[in-house]
Structures are given as C-alpha cells and as structure tokens.
Image (cartoon, helix red, strand yellow):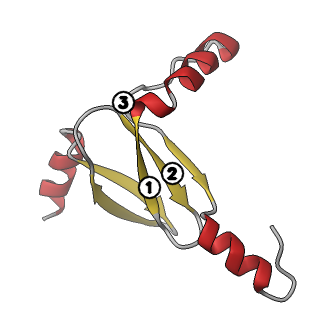
C-alpha cells in the first residue's frame, strides 16, 4: 500500500504532509495548486496556482530563490482553530 501511495505522490496525484512525526496523504486535483495547512487540526485547503503566482514571482525576484510553481504549502492556523483558541482560557494567538 505504501509503495502505491509513494508512486501516486511521485506522479503528483497525492500530496504528502508531515504532521506530528507522521505522514498523511491527500488526493490532489490536476494542475498547479497550493495548500493552506492548519497546524492545529490538520485541515488542508487547496488553492489554484493562480492565487499565489505573483507572490512566487516576487519571491524569486527578491530572494534569488526559484520556488516550485507546481506545489507549495503554507502552514498556519485555520479560522475555526483560531476562534476556538481565543475562547479558551489563556488563548489569543
């Protein structure tokens, strides 16, 4: 099973995420896209490549760094987890 998952990842059909020392796999749509990944609950939101193209071009120009335009992952905290954290005693990211 894991060989098949790795083959699917190599072919760009699934994406591999590292979370809490474990690998998780998610089916991806075709074409360039990017992921917003919640570090609290693990939610993954897929965005089309067009939404970050200009930012990636700016990174390339500013940092002398060539990002992979096919995939990028942006880790942070989703709105649901952020709101829940603010309601918790001592919360407030």
Residue 71, image quadrant: top left
How far apart marks 3 and 1 lie (CA) works out to 15 Å
Looking at the image, the residue that sits furthest to the right is 90
Residue 39, image quadrant: bottom right
Number of marks drawn:
3
Residue at image mark 1? 45
Vertical placement of residue 53 versus 29, above or below? above
* Residue 65 point in image, percent of width and height: 58, 17
* Camera-side residue of 9 and 35: 35
Q: Nearer the viewer, mark 3 or mark 1?
A: 1
Instruction: State left or right for residue 45 relative to residue 15.
Output: right
Tell me what residue is drawn at x 38 percent, y 63 percent.
Answer: 23
Badge 3: residue crowd in 10 Å (few <14, some 14–19, many ≥20)? few
- Say what secondary structure mark 1 lies in: strand
Vertical placement of residue 93 versus 30, above or below? below
Quarter occupied by the N terminus: bottom left
Residue at image mark 3? 70
Q: Are marks 1 and 2 in contact (CB under 8 Å)?
A: yes
Tell me what residue is drawn at x 27 percent, y 49 percent.
Answer: 28
How far apart marks 3 and 2 lie (CA) works out to 14 Å
Instruction: State left or right for residue 48 relative to residue 14.
Output: right
Instruction: State left or right for residue 43 relative to residue 24.
Output: right
* Residue 11 point in image, percent of width and height: 18, 39
- Say what secondary structure mark 3 lies in: loop
* Camera-side residue of 64 and 91: 91
Residue at image mark 2? 36
User: Which one is earlier in the sequence, the residue at label 1 or at label 2?
Assistant: 2
User: Which one is earlier in the sequence, the residue at label 3 or at label 1?
Assistant: 1
Instruction: State left or right for residue 23 relative to residue 63.
Output: left
């Amino acid at each position: 099973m894991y060989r098949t998952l790795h083959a699917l990842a190599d072919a760009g059909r699934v994406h591999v995420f590292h979370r809490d020392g474990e690998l998780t796999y998610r089916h991806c749509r075709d074409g360039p896209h990017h992921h917003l990944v919640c570090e609290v609950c693990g939610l993954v939101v897929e965005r089309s490549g067009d939404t970050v193209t200009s930012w990636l071009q700016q990174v390339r120009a500013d940092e002398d760094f060539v990002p992979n335009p096919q995939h990028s992952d942006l880790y942070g905290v989703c709105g649901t987890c952020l709101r829940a954290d603010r309601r918790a005693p001592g919360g407030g990211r």
